């Protein structure tokens, strides 16, 4: 059961990492006026937020260890921060909304780290001798 949640976590974090690249493209085509609205960018962003929440739940339920859970939680918080940052433009704080783009780069970096931690944790579990205690990275 735990290995199933580990695979789910790995798949979701890989999806998020690729999704961040697609997000940047969608933002670019909107700013270049190829499309008339940022709706696709917004919808994918909401999907990435949901995926990051599900990845966090999978890491916790899968008992992936403090490190994997911690970096997955950080990824969730960074993605959750995105709509808050962009709305600062409407709140009269455009300088704060500029951090939306910088935060996207952090999401991409942390997403890659989370995907790698997921792979390492899964590989360690698969190599473990049955009945032997497995210590995950960061435990």
Image: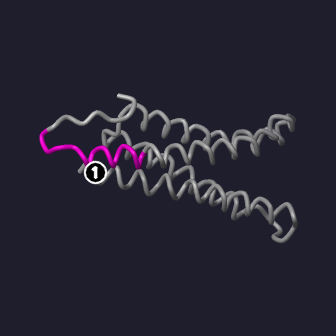
Above-or-below relation of 15 to 84: below
Q: How is the image coloured?
A: one colour
Q: Residue furthest bottom?
A: 34
**The quarter of the displayed image where residue 77 is located:** top right
Could you say whether the residue bearing mark 1 is in a helix, strand or loop? helix
Left or right of 9 on screen, residue 40:
right
Q: Which residue is mark 1?
A: 3
Q: As rendered, which of 131 and 108 lies closer to the eye?
A: 131
Of the 4 image quadrants, the one containing the C terminus is top left
Q: Residue furthest left?
A: 131
x 83%, y 42%: residue: 90
Looking at the magenta stretch, what is its main secondary structure? helix
Whether the magenta-drawn stretch holds residue 124 is answered as: yes
Mark 1 Cα within 10 Å, few/some/many (few <14, many 20+)?
A: some
Q: As rendered, which of 130 and 79 lies closer to the eye?
A: 130
Left or right of 107 on screen, residue 53:
left
Image spot of residue 51 (x, y percent): 50, 53
* First to last magenta residue range: 118-131
Please state the total of marks drawn on the protein image: 1
**The quarter of the displayed image where residue 59 is located:** top left
Image spot of residue 114 (x, y percent): 50, 44
Image spot of residue 125 (x, y percent): 27, 45
Above-or-below relation of 50 to 76: below
**The quarter of the displayed image where residue 121 is located:** top left
x 87%, y 67%: residue: 33
Whether the magenta-drawn stretch holds residue 98 is answered as: no
Left or right of 79 on screen, residue 100:
right
Q: Residue furthest top?
A: 139
Image spot of residue 58 (x, y percent): 37, 46
x 24%, y 36%: residue: 134
x 33%, y 50%: residue: 5
């Amino acid at each position: 059961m735990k290995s199933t949640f580990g695979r789910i976590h790995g798949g979701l974090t890989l999806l998020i990492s690729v999704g961040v690249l697609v997000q940047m493209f969608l933002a670019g085509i909107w700013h270049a006026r190829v499309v008339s609205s940022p709706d696709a960018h917004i919808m994918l962003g909401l999907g990435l937020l949901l995926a990051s929440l599900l990845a966090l739940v999978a890491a916790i339920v899968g008992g992936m260890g403090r490190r994997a859970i911690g970096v997955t939680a950080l990824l969730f918080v960074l993605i959750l921060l995105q709509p808050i940052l962009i709305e600062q433009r409407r709140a009269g704080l455009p300088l704060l909304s500029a951090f939306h783009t910088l935060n996207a780069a952090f999401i991409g970096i942390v997403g890659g780290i989370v995907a790698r931690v997921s792979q390492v944790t899964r590989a360690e579990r698969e190599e473990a001798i049955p009945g032997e205690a497995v210590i995950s990275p960061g435990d």
